Image: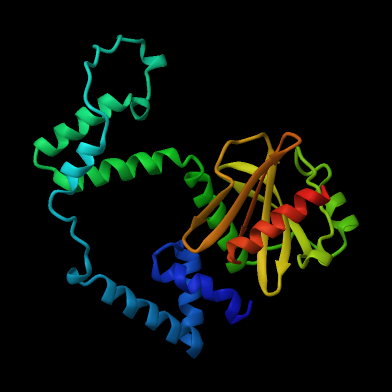
Amino acid sequence: MTCDDKKPLVHALADGELDVVHAREIEAHIASCANCAESYAEIMSLKQRLATAGLRLQAPAGLAERILQALPPPEAVEEPVRRPVRVRQAWWRAPANAWRLRLQGALAGGAGAFALAACLAFFVMRADTGNEIARSLVDGHLRSLAGQHLFDVQSTDQHTVKPWFAGKLDVTPPVPDLALKGFTLVGGRVDYVEGRAAAVVVYRRRTHVINLFVWPGTDPAPPSIELSGYMLRHWTKDGLTFWAVSDIAGSELGEFAEAYRAAT
């Protein structure tokens, strides 16, 4: 792997996102590479400057009250019907009135704008159902770059890569040739995402790797996610789930997804 391939892992090391094995590998590379050592030092210096207490943004006075005033007026909230545990209603689906009362209670208890922000942030994070799987996919992408398991079969020929998957998994993914679109097929492998086996078709965009994970099913998730500097595109087709992961720009990964779907 070149330094360009390792640069994303230098950032991941600085953010504490690598496991012990890969962290030691990148630390050893930094010790022998002046350019990567300089990049790592700059990242850590920037993190220290950003941690300065004076840079924290304080919520302006009265923010919580202005938010409460913008919410719908409170109405009588009926006592919820007791249900068996197995059909318990999710709290994040509570009606707007109940939300307003909960926020008022938090503010009255002295939590202030912080509690309000935390409540709203948790609600937004819970609504993004793709975050957990996205983290696993980014981990798999990084493992393929840091280790020696980018390919089980290495070839630019779709008629070599596609048959290789036959019989190894419950799915044989489409393997279109997208070279004319600027995405070069370079191989494939079998990987595991949250305990499930997945076919991975590997493409390159210049020096950047695109890992396309494919498995049976139609898992719901947002079509686009950005996580730790990596872009992910998700779609389903013909009973299969597709996740493309790379560090290229989101617009380019979108072009890849469109080209792949059009070719299949």
Indicate left or right for 45 with 195 as reference.
left
Residue that protrudes farthest toward the bottom in the picture = 34
Q: Residue at x 25, y 38 (%)?
A: 70
Residue that protrudes farthest toward the right in the picture = 159
Residue 157 higher or lower than 124, as above or below: below
Number of disc labels: 0
Determine if residue 149 is in view: no
Residue 207 in the image: x percent, y percent? 67, 74
Residue 206 in the image: x percent, y percent? 70, 74
Q: Residue at x 56, y 40 (%)?
A: 221
On-image quarter of the N terminus: bottom right
Determine if residue 234 is in view: yes
Q: Residue at x 34, y 10 (%)?
A: 83
Front-most of residues 115 and 228: 115
Residue 69 in the image: x percent, y percent? 20, 37
Q: Residue at x 67, y 62 (%)?
A: 210
Residue 97 in the image: x percent, y percent? 26, 25
Indicate left or right for 85 with 202 as reference.
left
Q: How is the image coloured?
A: rainbow
Front-most of residues 101 and 218: 101
Picture quarter containing residue 51? bottom left
